[in-house]
Image (cartoon, rainbow, N blue to C red):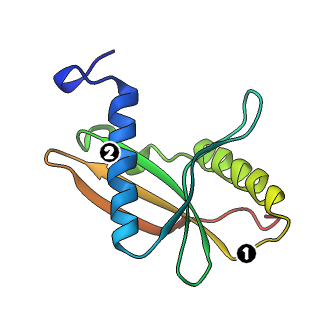
Amino acid sequence: MGGAAGQTTKDRGDAAEDAALAHLRRHGLSLVQRNFRTPGRGGGEVDLIMREPDGTLVFVEVRQRASQRQGGAGASVTGVKQRRIVFAARHFLLRLGSEPACRFDVVLIEGTPPRIEWLRAAFDAPAAF
């Protein structure tokens, strides 16, 4: 279960989220919440919920892979994963009582040394969102 230098999968995931958060903050976004999860089994999770200076709420999925094998980090954001992120985003928005402009971004972290790629509006929620 351990990886490079004895790191666990959780350690590597946390480090990837930290790197993504720092990258987004350097680009002017502010953190609203980290690791938002819906209650119960089979729900969804959003790694980072950020806010653009214009008020747009950004739901961010962070994906990290050591290499491009099997399609790399981007290929791991499947349709099922997208639906779970959208489900969690809907749940989060219900708590707000208002619905600001929103989008779904993906931050890919790949290779050694790690390269960060920020995909703005990487996917859309269904029209019923």
Mark 1 residue type? Pro
Residue at image position (40%, 47%) is 17
Local crowd at mark 1 within 10 Å, few (<14), some, or many (≥20)? few
Residue at image position (64%, 49%) is 85
Above or below, 5 relative to 74: above
Foreground pick, 73 / 70:
73
Apparent side of residue 94 relative to residue 67 in the rendered image (left or right): right
| Whether residue 71 is visible | no
Of the image marks 2 and 1, the number of the one nearer the N terminus: 2
Residue 7: x, y in percent? 27, 24
Query: Dot 2: what SS?
Result: helix
| Residue situated furthest bottom in the rendering | 54
Above or below, 125 relative to 33: below
| Whether residue 25 is visible | yes
Residue bearing mark 2: 72
Apparent side of residue 22 relative to residue 87 in the rendered image (left or right): left
Residue bearing mark 1: 100
Apparent side of residue 68 relative to residue 77 in the rendered image (left or right): left
Residue 111: x, y in percent? 19, 46
